Amino acid sequence: MNCLVQIREAQKSYTTTEKIIAEYILEHAHDILNDSAQELGKKTQTSAAAVIRFSKKLGYKGFSDLKISLAGSQQNEEENIDAVLEETDDLSTLIHKCCQLNISTVQKTYQMINEKNLQKAIEYIINAQTVYLFGVGSSAIVAYDFSQKLIRIGKKAIYNSDIHVQMTFAESMSPNDVAVFISYSGMTTGLTGMAKKLKSDGIPCISITQNSKNIVAKNSTVNLFVPLEEKEIRIGAISSRSASLVMTDLLYYGVYKNDLQDNKDKLLETKDLVSRLLK
């Protein structure tokens, strides 16, 4: 994880005190590397306990662990790229902006990855009898793509683009299954209700959302976060889709690698079957 990216991307989830600590760290990243939690608490007019809680909220064992990650993140801080389209943009400018947007989104997605959470999510999918996928709008593309990948290696996966059909999945699910919610906002009507329902039923849930206080993530067993985009809606939808595809591809690779040779055989068998049926 890139600590600087992680701190910036989690801004919507911060309390007032956490915002003060986050802003100070982002502005004085190099200067605080030799500070103790107590010293940073004094500098931010908060407390050592608040600094430690902030560090743990980001997934670190404590402030010392955060500083180690922060030291390694200095050289990786990305440039602030303005990718909003303008009427005066010619085709060359459009191509450059789209390229930079995609590169920035993918880089930030990888820098935000929490490996422990990713590994937990992979294990849930491997051990699940059935993987149920939830997602609408641009997330539907990601959900469908992921379901097809899993099916081709013999993993039972169920997805339907109709949100009303997705709501009926709950009647068939058991604690031996796993739900994968793909929702950039984590606040999509229908998905929020499903997340609450499945949590109350004891169904393991994996969420892929932005890093914010959102209902889907709050009610999920494992959270995987994608970068927070505050661009134009037409740009944000592209970025969130790209970031979500990165995350589902990583889940797929993890599941595939778990039984490499068998999954290779299944892919070949699936390809051969499709070829024969199309003749």
Image (spheres, grey):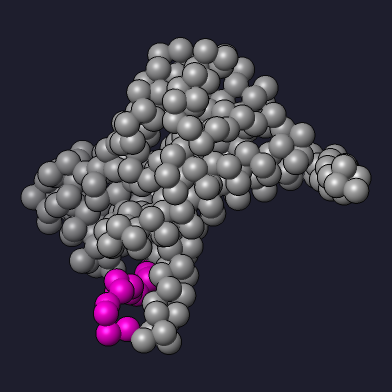
Frontmost residue, 47 versus 188: 188
Q: Position of residue 241 (x, y in %)?
A: 46, 53
Q: Position of residue 259 (x, y in %)?
A: 79, 39
The chief SS type of the magenta part is: loop
Q: Position of residue 223 (x, y in %)?
A: 44, 37
Frontmost residue, 151 versus 251: 151
The quadrant where residue 23 appears: bottom left
Residue 88 part of the magenta-drawn span: yes
- Asked if residue 161 is positioned above or below residue 92 in the image, the reply reads above
- Asked if residue 267 is positioned above or below residue 191 in the image, the reply reads below
Q: Residue furthest left?
A: 45
The quadrant where residue 159 appears: top right
Q: Residue visible at 40% across and 14% down?
A: 200
Q: Residue furthest front?
A: 279
Q: Residue visible at 18% across and 59% down?
A: 24
The image shows a total of numbered marks equal to 0
The quadrant where residue 146 appears: top right
Q: Residue visible at 45% across and 19% down?
A: 198
Q: Is residue 159 left or right of residue 55?
A: right
Q: Position of residue 174 (x, y in %)?
A: 57, 14
Frontmost residue, 146 versus 165: 165
- Asked if residue 13 is positioned above or below residue 84 in the image, the reply reads above
Residue 60 part of the magenta-drawn span: no
Q: Residue visible at 57% across and 28% down?
A: 132
Quarter of the figure with the N terminus: bottom left
Residue 272 visible, this orientation: no
Magenta-highlighted residues: 74-89
